[in-house]
Image (cartoon, helix red, strand yellow):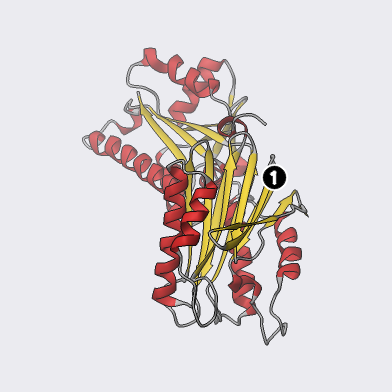
Amino acid sequence: MGDLNTDLHVEVGKSQLNKHGEELCGDSVEVGEGPGSTIVVLSDGLGSGVKANILSSLTVRMIATMLKGGLALEDVIDTLARTLPVCEKRHLAYSTFSILQVFRDGSAYLAEYDSPPAFIGRGRDLRPVPRSECVVGGRVVKEAFFSVQDGDWIVMVSDGILHAGIGGVWNTGWGWDRVANYIQSVAAWAETAHEFAEEIARVTDKLYGQKPGDDATAVAIRIRRPRTLTMLVGPPVDRRGDPVVVGKLVEEPGKKVVCGGTTGNMVARILGKPITVDLKSQDRRVPPTAEIEGIDLVTEGMLTLSYTLEKLKAGAKLRDVAWKRDGASRLASVLLEADSVRIIVGRAINPAHQSPDVPVTLALKHKIVDELAQVLRSMGKTVRVECY
């Protein structure tokens, strides 16, 4: 299967609904990196509100911390089984849990304790993944060992998703089978794991009549090839560095973006390729894009970067911008698609900006790039910024 860092990417998205009238969600989710793996933990605390939130938070943190520390899963579950109390009246665990661990060699492990079985799929089809039962610390835990590849997905949900519509649309609620059918249809079009999870939560909320009768959480995990993006923003201070930064741009795998008119001309000159303006991309606010063979996107500089940042800060979704032609929407689209982004910033001063406020202009460029990096990191992306 190869190393997951180079061959596969584990993308995780979550969406949660609080029980109607509660300020806190009684479900908790923790995502982290363990030894050679990605770990996703979902826990549903008994009841709702503050007490349930504390119990589920404690559960996911304990699990994630122990797994990150390299503790064997058997030992983790044994510790939890012995630690987590059981409600004497209802004979229910105070918090349930589902643990997914995807390893770098493409193998995966799933452990479920009193929680709905996860939905495991490939493409748009469900995969039948058998579970075996084991008793750990007096608790029955269901386990599954399976392998994953590009195009696979796993959806973990709390009880609140399955109970949606209970006594209303359906007497017994949405139910596992109906949820499974819907998840398969969403898998066919959802661009990102976050959109996948959000759509499940949106329908759940609708089935509850916008007044959820229980905390509801959907966690979507997509397994796919990593998407990398390299951006060159401005030429370097020393012109002798021009071939160096262009070399760094073209040598990187994945998509390549050039921001700035002067930068575009520099790249075209060094690559010996023509640069042509795409007038169809013109927008009322955003300057037109250009085209250079071998470069995925060539945009104007400061204005386009500013409008792109504005869109990302406003929470633009990939489906909102992917079909638009203007430079800011196209730049936002490739940034939203990417898992890791390398931004090469040239510190040369644009001759068009030769005025008393040049230091301000330069500072503004760095501010925009820094803010852009922060927004992308907050989305879980890896971002590297280099200056020349």
The residue wearing badge 1 is 146
267 to 60, vertically: above or below: above
User: Measured from the top left, where is residue 313 in percent x and y?
Assistant: 43, 54
Give the left or right position of residue 312, taking residue 280 as reference.
left
What's the residue type where badge 1 is placed?
Phe
Q: Residue at x 47, y 61 (%)?
A: 82
Q: Position of residue 170 (x, y in %)?
A: 72, 82
Residue 6 seen anywhere in this rendered image of the structure:
yes
Identified at 43% across, 68% down, the residue is 55
Question: What residue is at 51 percent from the left and 55 percent from the top?
Answer: 78
The answer to whether any part of residue 285 appears in the image is: no
Identify the image quadrant of the N terminus: top right
Q: Where, by quadrant of the figure, is residue 302 drawn?
A: top left
Q: In the image, is residue 162 above or below residue 242? A: below
Nearer the observer, 10 or 289: 10
| SS assignment at label 1 | strand
Q: Position of residue 84 (x, y in %)?
A: 46, 65
Crowd tier of the residue under label 1, counting other residues whose Cα lies within 10 Å: few below 14, some 14–19, many 20 or above: few
Farthest residue in the left direction?
Answer: 356
